[in-house]
Image (tube, grey):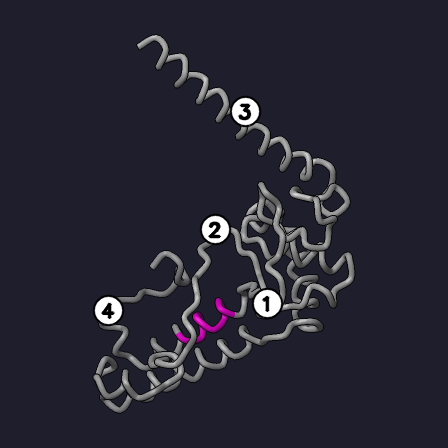
Amino acid sequence: MQFLKPGEKYSLSDLLKPETLSQLGRILSEMFSELVVCERVNTGELTANENRIYALCSNPKAWERFTPKERYKRRKQFEEIMQAKGKTNWKQVTAKLISEKWAMLLTLSKSGHVLTNHQIIKSGDNLTDLPKTEKRLFNRLDNLLIPTLPGLPCARTCKTCGRDISHQKKESIFCSAKDVGYKEAHRCRNKDSGQRRTLRKREARKSLNAKKE
């Protein structure tokens, strides 16, 4: 409720009003248009700079570190890559389906239909009945999102942050300073060595305690 515009007052009874549903539908469509959607891309077709931007912006964690100015810049760069090199158009298709679904529900509400009627849900509509759709895992924001393409080798990723490093040397296991900057690359290496050091100390304490017992 706090997300909705401050001047509006909504209650459950308002959901029976077509004008309220219409307004909520517009808000939903507007918010979806603001999402950053990672389309499938053949990284072999990207330039070195495009690969760097694609790898960076494909990682949800990176967006948490961006400043507002960086977010605006990266979003524009990322969307340009998606439009020029993207092999899918998930965002456009989904936006269209959302709009069509909302219009259908609004029409049903005006005609007096119950929106959860069994016949409606099993109508075969794209968003409510997908019996033949391939099931895929959903990546939460707290998980690193690593895009891969069918028929292509799985992307090699940084051992620490999960960025795509497929374009780096085969022996690379961390981000390159050339791609993400010295500080960021150094942070990846330090975090990994820190984790290993902590593990060694923990094992040493266990061994010492075992000897005392």
The amino acid type of the residue labelled 4 equals Leu
- Residue at image mark 1: 149
Q: Nearer the viewer, mark 2 or mark 1?
A: 1
**Disc on the earlier residue, 3 or 4:** 4
Q: Is residue 35 above or below residue 15?
A: above
Q: Return the mark for residue 130.
A: none
> Hey, what amino acid is under mark 3?
Arg
Earlier along the polypeptide chain: callout 1 or callout 3? 1
Mark 1 Cα within 10 Å, few/some/many (few <14, many 20+)?
Answer: few
Q: Earlier in the sequence, mark 2 or mark 1?
A: 2
Answer few, some or many: residues within 10 Å of disc 3's Cα (few below 14, many 20 plus, some between 14 and 19).
Answer: few
What is the spatial separation of the Cα atoms under label 3 and label 4, in whole angstroms? Answer: 55 Å
What residue is shown with label 3? 197
Q: Looking at the rendering, in which quadrant would you find the N terminus?
A: bottom left
Instruction: Give the CA separation, mark 2 to mark 1.
Output: 19 Å
User: Decide: marks 2, 1 in contact (CB < 8 A)?
Assistant: no
Residue carrying label 4: 12
**Mark 1 or 4: the one toward you:** 1
Q: Residue at image x 56%, y 66%?
A: 37
Q: CA distance from mark 2 to mark 4?
A: 34 Å
Dividing the picture into quadrants, the one containing residue 98 is bottom left
